[in-house]
Image (spheres, rainbow, N blue to C red):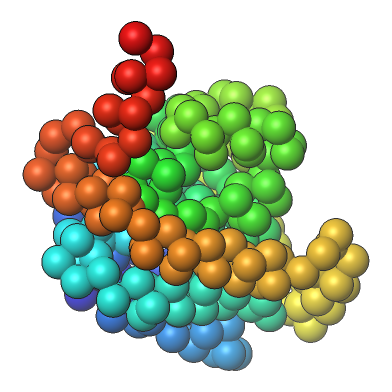
Amino acid sequence: MAFETLIENGVAELIFCKPPVNAFNSQEWAAISDKIDDLGADPQVKVIVIRAEGKGFCAGVDIKELAADSTKIIAVNKGNYDTFKSIHLNPKPVIVAVHGFVLGGGIGISGAADIIVASECARFGVPEVDRGAMGGGAHLQRMFPVQKVRYMYYTGDFINAQEAYRLGAVERVVPLDQLRATALEIAAKIAEKSSPMIQLAKEALTGIEDGNLEDKYRWEQGFTLQAYTEKDSQEARNAFVEKRDAAFKNDATNSAKHS
């Protein structure tokens, strides 16, 4: 199982546990979405905390699955979309506690959440362009300013937890050994309040957001499908799996232009 769950005192924990990097295939993304929906409908649950074991929070999709069969992108897209929607539109508040790398689908999860707590070692990134795909910009833009999002998207550069805190995305930055306790402390504070009132508050706050997050992400996913028709997209995935530099079809042309 790629994850496990615990429920105690009104707080549900969904814990990613798929070593080494918590990168999920299409079936696993679907299962994560279903479980988050179940937790949101469970009357015992007042708050949901999503965290992870291992080297990092979430490395996104299983690139090896897509490198072996590019048609899986349809199922992966659906799993991502459903998971992020399950968090963003969940009737219960969702707190995400991140550490290590927060990539691709990890960005979607974080950007869809209500509150983010980060360890000092957390690093946020969207390497989609280098993997021959699109996606994550809508959720990243819910965390960071537009120009910062574009810089991260175009360059693939990461930002650390301290910078994410400075930009307002992260509520607290704590040592790794305090991450779970900090997330549970915030969750307990919320769980003490009237659950119907908190659910109304979340619905109200979601309704006044600028634009429809799900529509924006769906727009992006259309470009992921278009990207997969490009030979460069398959080459990017193959290079990642084979642990080598990608050789894109325009490299020779670009070299000639600059010679």
Q: Where is residue 78 drawn, in percent x and y? A: 45, 79
User: Residue 30 vs residue 226: left or right?
Assistant: left
The front one of 87 and 41 is: 87
Is residue 109 placed above or below 222 in the rendered structure?
Answer: above
Q: Report the number of numbered marks.
A: 0
Q: Quadrant of the N terminus?
A: bottom left
* Residue at the image position 68 percent from the left and 47 percent from the top: 141
The front one of 59 and 52 is: 59
* Residue at the image position 67 percent from the left and 76 percent from the top: 89
* Residue at the image position 20 percent from the left and 32 percent from the top: 245
The front one of 236 and 8 is: 236
Is residue 95 placed above or below 176 in the rendered structure?
Answer: below
* Residue at the image position 36 percent from the left and 80 percent from the top: 75
User: Residue 216 vs residue 62: left or right?
Assistant: right
Q: Where is residue 121 drawn, in percent x and y? A: 40, 29
User: Residue 17 vs residue 214: left or right?
Assistant: left
Residue 35 visible in the snapshot: no
The front one of 78 and 53 is: 78
Residue 97 visible in the snapshot: yes
Q: Where is residue 109 drawn, in percent x and y? A: 51, 60
Q: Where is residue 229 drawn, in percent x and y? A: 37, 64
Is residue 155 placed above or below 228 in the rendered structure?
Answer: above
